[in-house]
């Protein structure tokens, strides 16, 4: 199903969870595995470096840039070595490893153009700053991704998801998420659960999904919950013991998201399980 999987590393605990999950998926599906460590150019050239320079007795941050880059290079090598060792231990004999310097979201999005799946952690190295449940790099990647993005769970994965749920809202991204989930369940011999939220008009979204699952001989259950999408997903995950979620990403459009917010960020922040997101 997945022929090439790219995982983004940055040394954070969340990216290591993503690494574990990517390795398990690659081993299960026989996929080629590519690990990339992005040194974000903003951490080297950013205004914070210049602002702090006078504290260190320098007129500019230039003397520190080489030292900062060296530190990131060492960290990159450590994380890529660690990843490769774990992949080989899992039986994966060929691992592509890449170090890239640039804007993280652009580098990851570009790598995703030649992959079937991009795997990322929820938040990156700056997890200690801010209150947002997911990182800004992940949000930017999701807005530009041409292929599915898998957001790893909050804890290391011991198995690939085998009881998965699709959140349906009638929009094209969620329809594509359903298609991906059915392919996944057929390949992994997993079970599928179908969820929609709202009043009884939302029942019409479930019937075509039932037929599609039947056509592919996928075991399914479904429910409509009269609740806000985030609350509905959270309740259904607990009710069914879901270990993997498929959903459309940013289905309302950029203007709606800016003015009214997005269910995408709300749901990812609320659940702790791996989540496949499809534009």
Image (cartoon, rainbow, N blue to C red):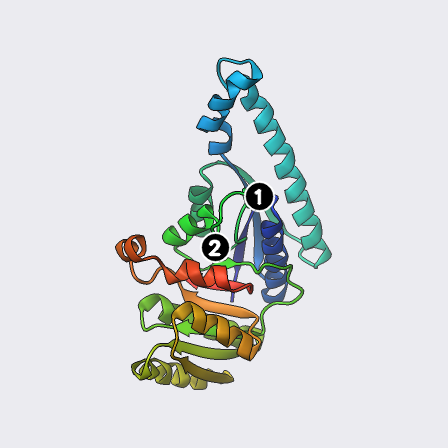
Which one is earlier in the sequence, the residue at label 1 or at label 2? 1
Picture residue at 70% right of the left edge, 59% below the top: 91
Q: Secondary structure at mark 1?
A: loop
The residue at which mark 1 appears reads as: 10
Q: Is residue 185 above or below residue 38?
A: below
Relative vertical location of residue 125 with respect to residue 191 in this rendering, above or below? above
Give how far across and how far down residue 122 sits, in percent: 52, 53
Residue 109 rendering spot, x and y as whole percentages: 43, 48
- Is residue 230 in view? yes
**Which sits in the foreground, 220 or 129?**
129
Q: Nearer the viewer, mark 1 or mark 2?
A: 1
Q: Which residue is mark 2?
A: 115
The secondary structure type at the circle numbered 2 is loop
Between residue 65 and residue 145, name the one nearer to us.
Answer: 65
Residue ID at (69%, 46%): 82
Nearer to us in this view, 160 or 60: 60
How many numbered marks does the figure carry? Answer: 2
Question: Is 27 left, or right, of 143 in this rendering?
Answer: right
Few, some or many C-alpha atoms within 10 Å of disc 2 (few <14, some 14-19, many ≥20)?
many
């Amino acid at each position: 199903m997945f022929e090439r999987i790219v995982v983004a590393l940055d040394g954070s605990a969340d990216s290591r969870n993503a690494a574990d999950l990517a390795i398990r998926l690659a081993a299960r599906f026989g996929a080629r595995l590519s690990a990339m460590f992005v040194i974000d150019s903003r951490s080297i050239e950013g205004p914070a470096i210049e602002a702090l320079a006078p504290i260190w007795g320098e007129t500019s941050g230039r003397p520190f840039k080489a030292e900062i880059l060296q530190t990131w290079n060492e960290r990159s090598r450590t994380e890529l070595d660690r990843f490769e060792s774990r992949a080989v231990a899992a039986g994966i004999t060929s691992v592509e490893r890449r170090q890239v310097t640039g804007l993280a979201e652009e580098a990851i999005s570009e790598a995703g153009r030649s992959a079937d799946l991009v795997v990322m952690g929820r938040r990156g190295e700056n997890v200690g700053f801010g209150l947002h449940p997911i990182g800004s790099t992940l949000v930017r990647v999701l807005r530009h991704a041409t292929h599915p993005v898998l957001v790893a769970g909050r804890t290391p994965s011991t198995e690939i998801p085998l009881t998965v749920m699709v959140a349906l809202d009638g929009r094209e991204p969620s329809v594509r998420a359903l298609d991906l989930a059915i392919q996944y369940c057929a390949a992994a011999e997993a079970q599928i659960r179908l969820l929609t939220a709202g009043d009884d008009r939302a029942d019409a979204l479930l019937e075509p999904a039932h037929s599609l699952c039947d056509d592919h001989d996928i075991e399914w259950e479904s429910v409509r919950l009269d609740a806000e999408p985030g609350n509905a997903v959270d309740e259904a995950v607990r009710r069914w013991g879901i270990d993997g979620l498929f959903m459309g990403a940013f289905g309302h459009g950029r203007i709606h998201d800016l003015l009214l917010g997005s269910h995408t960020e709300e749901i990812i922040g609320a659940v702790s399980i791996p989540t496949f997101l499809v534009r």
